[in-house]
């Protein structure tokens, strides 16, 4: 059955698929990775060791993954969406039980020598699963509240597991990502309002049950000066570094805050601060513009796609990337609480790089297969 | 398909909405970045510099103290110090063991070092030992490979080349207390010292100098990365004293091992040529910390080595006070130079009998004879006629019992009693008190410096004040001209009468101090003896013809005093000598004063700008 349906589609060979890849978009990703190389080179005090060199290697591996995923037929990806979700959920559950404890939270699991952060993989799997779910749904069915219960559970179950790790930031990102998917699928406004209304009450209740370090993060966010040597130190030092960079920055390798170790985690979460200090407002805005191009480019891919699954996937992956970027940059500027979210393709770190590149691979697959039609029988089920 | 189109339309609308939202949020972050990086940049740049730049002060060298001819009285010498940088060694104990083989460390030193190593970050140097000798320093350097973490560095420390000789005048320095540090951050520097006594204390602010600073780039842990800027400090001002170190040495030689004090002034302008106190102490001990045993020794010494007897020793002036009584009487016209008073050996006042030192009496005497013989009855009677208040007023004018305008941190004022003072104490003033005051006993207490001032004022008629500072930072200080000092407005005729009496004491046959006569015929010395009882002579002792106060225990013997100026015809130098429990002024203090005067007249430090060719040190050595 399935084989015959696939045969009906306009098929194209490997070469034409490669030509369909948006190389301009890949170039944007390379430029971002280049920014990361420069910043990591400076973070190491003017040396490719230990960060920048490995960053390039990982990005190269990520590019191979991206192209590989881009060539996979979007319909195959759609079929594998729920199984992938299942695997990721199992991994999350495993982390909750057996994961490594790093920086006070269980987030990592080792698979074949590779450290994996299942919550990162889960974001992509969730996007695929929700897209798959809504892809099949007619407009009427989306209006039916009962139809929305299974995907809602698909969102809230991993959120609950991630909260237990505990990783407040990622849990919130996953929740917002799920909401964006619901929104794009066409769920009515008032239903969001219905869910959002009790949030303040739940938040107050949750705050009372939060871990001390989580509460400290929120307290510090509200008033970073209250604990200048402890939790607020990172934010204050980061703002000092950014502010001292000024309009044009202190110059490449000239940042004092980063090089004198005042800036914590400068190669990971606070890499944007490093850029802002050395290249100033101009450099910071340029990097933000590049990030915006990547986000909006992803959204354009979503708009140009002719099937609902592809549209939703592209939108979800772009939204996910946007959330990373927004949370990270807002965090280093002290606009939202500090929460261990790296700047994708710029920060040092292998797991995040791989998952982000896989995501872009899927996005590219959407682009390559933008005109592919799914069987109608499959759709209005 | 209609429904599908509707679904697509909703998606497109909402996707565009999301894109708008994303763009708006990123733009918001851009605005925020602008605020942090540009609008508030100045504030954050300052904070960034505060983070990374650590300004540290460099201790300035303390200013030198010189004598009038440029001899260094207080200077700086190199101070070799061994410090331990813990991060440069794997085993602090092993390093300290190795160090102890070269320079033995006491247990308490060692525990202090270990304690400090644990307290500080591992790259902060900890002082192991100060004041290393050249030899020790060299041996540490040679063994450096076996002493990882030990670093020898060089600082400066205060040095007093003449040591004990001028300890009481120059004073000493010591590490500042926490209260001092609160006043001046300069004092928090390691190795800095603060003036604690004498000139070191009086001119402390000038001597301190101005701190330099070095700006260091430090990382978050405080480790120094590099030096950004350095501004050397300014050495403290140089203080030139009026003291002649060579004369000071000679005076000390004449005082010998007595517990004594001597002051030599230029009597025309009050410059202090020498101010000696014996026994003395080593001022450099305060620099490094006075050992407990040394404190015990000082406190046990009845002769009070730490006390500057010249400014803080209080003595009854005894017969040296008689010139003041005479001047008070002459000025009050209660005595004329030709008045004669009969001395039968005592003066009766009601039931009380006041004895003359000469039991047989002096017979009839005028003022000249009264001073020459130091007749007690003559001055009992003169004091009775004049009254205590007029005597006290004259004594104060002459510098006795008053605060002198000296440039030392402290002095004792002493006491010239008055009727008012006694009544304030709750007692009536008795005539007997006036009588004993006439011979400088009773309540009267003065310092050797006041006595020298008193003689200088009698000799010149000017109200000079003794002072020690001749030059400050190269600037001549006022007061080195006689005309800088006001006249006392005591009639020259009265002063001449008294001076003549003082001349007779030494130079006329029958005077009380023939031993004080100068051998050199070029100069004549005018002086006055004094013996100050430290306890009342009992009737039994007085009637015992064999009574000899020199047989008393040392601390009960009277003090011996002598005041003098010379040359008689053109007064230039005034001196006072007080020998504690020296028994008799004429026999003990007179010859000392004579020798001091001979030296000062020969050297004539006030009359030359270069030191005498032949140094006293060479003469004795």
Image: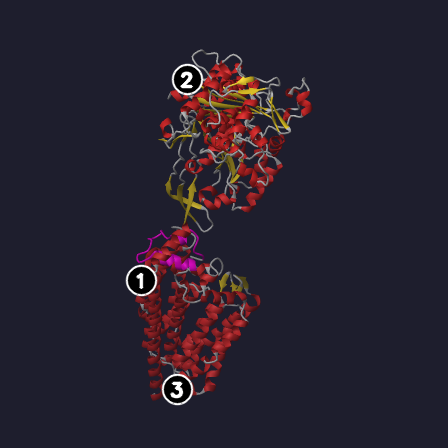
The answer to the question of whether label 3 and label 2 lie on touching residues, with beta carbons closer than 8 A, is no
Circle 3: element type:
helix
Q: Which mark is residue A139?
A: 3
Q: Is residue A263 magenta?
A: yes
Instruction: Check disc 1 and report the residue beneath it.
Output: A286
- For the record, the magenta segment spans A236-264
How are the colours assigned in the image?
secondary structure
Whether residue B143 is visible: no
**Residue B319 magenta:** no
Q: Is residue A302 above or below residue A37?
A: below
Instruction: Give the image location of residue B198, x and y in percent.
Output: 48, 33
SS at badge 1: helix
The answer to whether tags 3 and 2 share a subunit is: no
- Spatial CA distance of label 3 from label 1 is 41 Å
Dot 2, crowdedness within 10 Å: few (<14), some or many (≥20)? Answer: few
Write down the quadrant of residue A375 in the picture.
bottom left
Q: Quadrant of the N terminus of chain B?
A: bottom left
């Amino acid at each position: 059955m399935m084989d015959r349906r696939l045969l009906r589609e306009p098929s194209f060979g490997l070469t034409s698929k490669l030509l369909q890849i948006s190389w301009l978009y890949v170039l944007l990703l390379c430029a971002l990775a280049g920014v990361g190389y420069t910043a990591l080179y400076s973070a190491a005090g003017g040396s490719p060791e230990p960060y920048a060199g490995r960053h390039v290697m990982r990005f190269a591996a990520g590019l191979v993954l991206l192209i590989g995923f881009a060539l996979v037929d979007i319909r195959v990806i759609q079929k594998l969406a729920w199984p992938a979700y299942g695997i990721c959920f199992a991994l999350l559950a495993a982390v909750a039980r057996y994961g490594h404890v790093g920086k006070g939270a269980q987030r990592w699991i080792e698979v074949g020598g590779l450290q994996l952060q299942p919550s990162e993989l889960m974001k992509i799997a969730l996007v695929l699963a929700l897209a798959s779910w809504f892809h099949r749904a007619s407009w009427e069915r989306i209006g039916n509240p009962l139809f929305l219960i299974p995907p809602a559970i698909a969102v809230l179950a991993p959120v609950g597991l991630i909260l237990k790790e505990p990783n407040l930031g990622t849990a919130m990102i996953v929740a917002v990502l799920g909401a964006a998917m619901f929104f794009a699928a066409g769920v009515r406004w008032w239903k969001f309002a219905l869910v959002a209304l009790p949030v303040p009450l739940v938040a107050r209740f949750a705050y009372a049950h939060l871990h001390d370090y989580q509460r400290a993060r929120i307290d510090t966010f509200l008033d970073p000066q209250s604990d200048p040597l402890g939790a607020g130190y990172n934010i204050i030092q980061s703002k000092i570094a950014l502010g001292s960079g000024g309009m044009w920055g202190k110059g490449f390798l000239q940042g004092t805050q980063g090089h004198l170790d005042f800036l914590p985690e400068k190669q990971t979460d606070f890499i944007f601060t490093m850029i802002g200090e050395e290249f100033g407002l101009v450099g910071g805005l340029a990097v933000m513009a590049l990030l915006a191009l990547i986000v909006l480019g992803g959204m354009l891919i979503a708009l140009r796609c002719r099937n609902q699954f592809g549209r939703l996937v592209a939108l979800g992956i772009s939204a996910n990337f946007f959330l990373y970027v927004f949370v990270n940059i807002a965090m280093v500027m002290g606009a939202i609480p500090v929460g261990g979210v790296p700047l994708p393709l710029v920060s040092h770190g292998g797991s995040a790089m791989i998952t982000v590149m896989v995501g872009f691979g899927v996005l590219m697959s959407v682009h390559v297969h933008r005109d592919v039609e799914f069987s109608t029988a499959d759709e209005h089920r | 398909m209609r429904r599908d189109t509707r679904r697509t339309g909703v998606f497109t609308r909402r996707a565009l909405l999301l894109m708008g939202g994303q763009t708006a949020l990123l733009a918001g972050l851009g605005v925020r970045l602008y605020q942090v990086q540009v609008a508030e940049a100045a504030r954050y740049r300052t904070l960034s510099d505060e983070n990374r730049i650590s300004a540290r002060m460099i201790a300035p060298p303390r200013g030198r103290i010189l004598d009038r001819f440029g001899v260094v009285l207080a200077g700086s010498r190199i101070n070799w110090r061994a410090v331990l940088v813990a991060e440069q060694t794997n085993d602090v104990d092993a390093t300290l063991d190795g160090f102890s083989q070269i320079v033995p460390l006491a247990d308490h030193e060692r525990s202090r070092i270990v304690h400090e190593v644990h307290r500080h970050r591992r790259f902060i140097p900890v002082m192991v030992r100060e004041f290393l000798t050249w030899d020790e320093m060299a041996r540490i350097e040679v063994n450096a490979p076996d002493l990882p973490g030990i670093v020898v560095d060089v600082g400066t420390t205060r040095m007093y080349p003449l040591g004990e000789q001028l300890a009481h005048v120059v004073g000493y320095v010591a590490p500042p207390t926490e209260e001092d540090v609160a006043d001046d951050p300069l004092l928090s520097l390691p190795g800095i010292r603060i003036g604690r006594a004498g000139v070191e204390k009086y001119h402390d602010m000038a001597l301190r100098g101005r701190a330099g600073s070095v700006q260091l780039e430090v990382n978050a842990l405080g480790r120094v990365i590099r030096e950004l800027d350095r501004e050397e400090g300014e050495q403290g001002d140089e203080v030139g004293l009026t003291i002649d170190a060579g004369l000071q040495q000679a005076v000390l030689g004449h005082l010998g091992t007595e517990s004594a004090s001597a002051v030599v002034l230029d009597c025309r302008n009050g410059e202090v040529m020498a101010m000696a106190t014996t026994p003395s102490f080593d001022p450099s001990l305060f620099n490094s910390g006075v050992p407990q045993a040394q404190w015990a020794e000082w406190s046990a010494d009845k002769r009070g080595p730490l006390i500057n007897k010249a400014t803080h020793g209080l003595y009854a002036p005894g017969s040296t006070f008689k010139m003041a009584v005479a001047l008070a009487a002459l000025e009050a016209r209660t005595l004329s130079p030709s008045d004669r008073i009969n001395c039968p050996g005592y003066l009766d006042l009601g039931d009380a009998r006041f004895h003359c030192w000469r039991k047989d009496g002096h017979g009839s005497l005028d003022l000249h004879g009264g001073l020459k013989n130091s007749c007690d009855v003559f001055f009992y009677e003169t004091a009775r006629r004049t009254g205590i208040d007029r005597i006290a007023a004259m004594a104060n004018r002459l510098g006795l019992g008053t605060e002198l305008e000296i440039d030392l941190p402290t002095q004792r004022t002493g006491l010239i009693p008055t009727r008012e003072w006694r009544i304030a104490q709750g007692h009536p003033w008795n005539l007997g008190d006036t009588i004993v005051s006439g011979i400088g006993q009773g309540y009267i207490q003065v310092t050797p410096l006041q006595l020298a001032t008193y003689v200088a004022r009698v000799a010149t008629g000017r109200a000079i004040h003794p002072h020690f500072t001749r030059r400050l930072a190269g600037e001549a200080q006022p007061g080195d001209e006689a005309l800088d000092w006001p006249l006392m407005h005591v009639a020259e005729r009265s002063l001449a009468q008294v001076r003549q009496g003082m001349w007779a004491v030494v130079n006329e046959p029958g005077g009380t101090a023939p031993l004080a006569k100068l051998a050199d015929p070029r100069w004549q010395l005018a002086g006055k003896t004094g013996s100050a009882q430290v306890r009342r002579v009992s009737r039994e002792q007085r009637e015992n013809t064999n009574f000899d106060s020199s047989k008393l225990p040392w601390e009960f013997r009277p003090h011996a005093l002598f005041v003098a100026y010379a040359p008689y015809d053109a007064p230039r130098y005034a001196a006072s000598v007080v020998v504690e429990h020296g028994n008799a002024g004429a026999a003990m203090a007179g010859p000392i004063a004579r020798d001091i005067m001979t030296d000062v007249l020969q050297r004539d430090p006030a009359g030359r700008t270069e030191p005498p060719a032949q140094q006293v040190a060479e003469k004795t050595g």
